[in-house]
Amino acid sequence: MPADTSLFTRPFVITCLATFFFYLSFYLLLPTMPLYVAGKGGTPAQLGLVFGLFAFMAMVLRPPVGWFIDTRGTRLVLLAGMAIFLVASLGYTAAGSVETVLALRLFHGMGMGLFPTAATVLVAEVAPPARRGEAMGWFGIANSAGLIIGPVAGTALAARMGFPALFLSAGGMAALGLACTAILPRVGRQPEARGRAVRWRDFFSRAAIFPSAILLFLYLPYGALVSFIPIIATRRGLGNPGVFYTIFALAVLLVRAKAGRLSDRRGRTAVILPGMLVAALAFAVLGLTSGPIGVLAGGAAYGIGFGAVQPALLALTADRVPLEERGKAMGTFYTAWELGISAGSIGSGLLLQVVDFPVMLLASSAIVVAGAMLTLLARPAAAPRPAP
C-alpha cells in the first residue's frame, strides 16, 4: 500500500472518536476514585486495589478477547466494552461501602479488557502499513485528549457537585462512545469462526512477548503512579491533583503522533529507548523533589517519555505478526499492560506500608531503566521498513 494512502478514513476517525469518549469516561474517575475510597475510610492497601482490581480483570480478559477478535471480528467486543463502562459508571452511584466499590472495579475492568484491544486491532487493520506508527500515534492522541480534560474536570465536578454527579457524567461519556461504536462501519477482515477446539497457544503470541516485556517495565511504575499521585500531589501543595494529569497529557499530545511517524522512518527502537530513559528521569524527579513544581515537572517528563514509547511499541507489536494473528498479539500486549498496572498498584500499596513515597518513586525509576536496557536486545529485523 503506498505511503500516501489516506489515513483519516471514516472508520479510523469514528474509532478514534469512540476511543476519546471511552477514555474520557475513564479519566473523569482516575484522580477521584482514590480520594473517594479514602473518604470512605479505605486503607493504603485498599487504595492500591482500586486500580489493581480494575487492571487485573482487564488483564484476565485480554488473551481470550484477542482470540475472539481473530475468530469473530471486533464489532461485538467494541460494543460490549463500551456498554460495561456505561453500566459500571452508573453503578458507583449506588455503592455504599469500600467493598462494593472494589467489586464494581472488577466489573468495570472488564470494559477495559474489551474495548481498547479491539480498537487497536481495528486501527492496525484500516491504517496503511507504511503509516502504522503514525496511526497509532493519532489513536493515542484520542486517549490523551480524554486525559487532558478528564482528571481536572472530574476533580472539580466531584468537589462542586459531589460524586453522584461525577459518576453520572462518566456514564454519559460512555453513552456517547456507545453511540459512536454503533455507527462504526463494518471494516477490516471478517474472520470466520474456527471449527477446531481452542488451544492455549491461541491466547498468546510468542512474537509479541518482546514488546510486551518492555511495556511491562513501563507500566509497573505507572500502576503505582495512578494509584497514589492524587495523594502525593495534594500533600505537596497542588490544589487540584487533576492538573498533574493535564500536564502529563499535554506532553503526551505534543510527542505522540510525531514519535509514531519517527518510528516509521527510523525504526521502533530509536524511539523506544530514549523514551524509556526520559520516563525513568520523570520518576527520579518526582522522588527527589517535594513541592508542586516538582510534581508538574515530573508529569511533563513522564508524558514525553510515555508518549514516545507507547505508539512505537504498539506498532512494533503489529509489525511482528501476520494479519490473522493480530488480535492474539494485541491481547498479549495488553495483558502485559494490565499486569503492570495491577501489580504496580497492589505492590505499591503494600510497599508503602514500610517505606515512604520518595523511596517508592525512586524504585519506580529503576524499574523503567531496566526496561530501557531490555530495549537494547531488540533485533534489527524487528524494525519496520522506512517509509518513502
Image: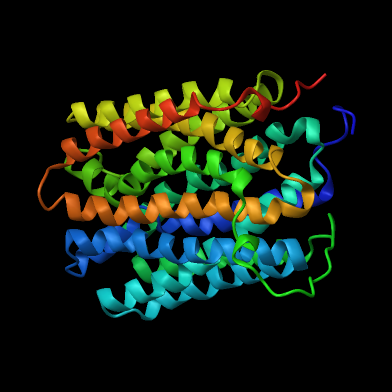
Task: Find the residue positioned furthest to the left.
Answer: 354
Q: In this view, does 11 lie above or below 186?
A: above
**Res 310 quadrant in image:** top right
Q: Nearer the viewer, residue 290 or 314?
A: 314
Screen quadrant of the C terminus: top right
Taking the image as drawn, is residue 28 in sight? Answer: yes
The reply to whether residue 169 is visible in this rendering is no
The picture quadrant where one finds residue 175 is bottom right
Picture quadrant where residue 46 is located: bottom left
Residue 25 percent coordinates (x, y): 51, 59
* Residue at image point 57% right, 61% down: 63
User: Image point 43% across, 68% down: which residue?
Assistant: 167
Q: In this view, does 4 lie to the left or right of 266?
A: right
Q: Position of residue 337 (x, y in %)?
A: 48, 49
Residue 189 left/right relative to 105: right
Q: How many marks?
A: 0
**Residue 229 vs residue 193: left or right?**
left
Above or below, comparing residue 343 to residue 87 in the picture: above
Where is residue 261 drawn, in percent x and y?
A: 68, 26
Picture colour scheme: rainbow
Quadrant housing the N terminus: top right
Q: In this view, does 293 lie above or below 223?
A: above
Residue 184 image position (x, y, % from top left): 79, 60
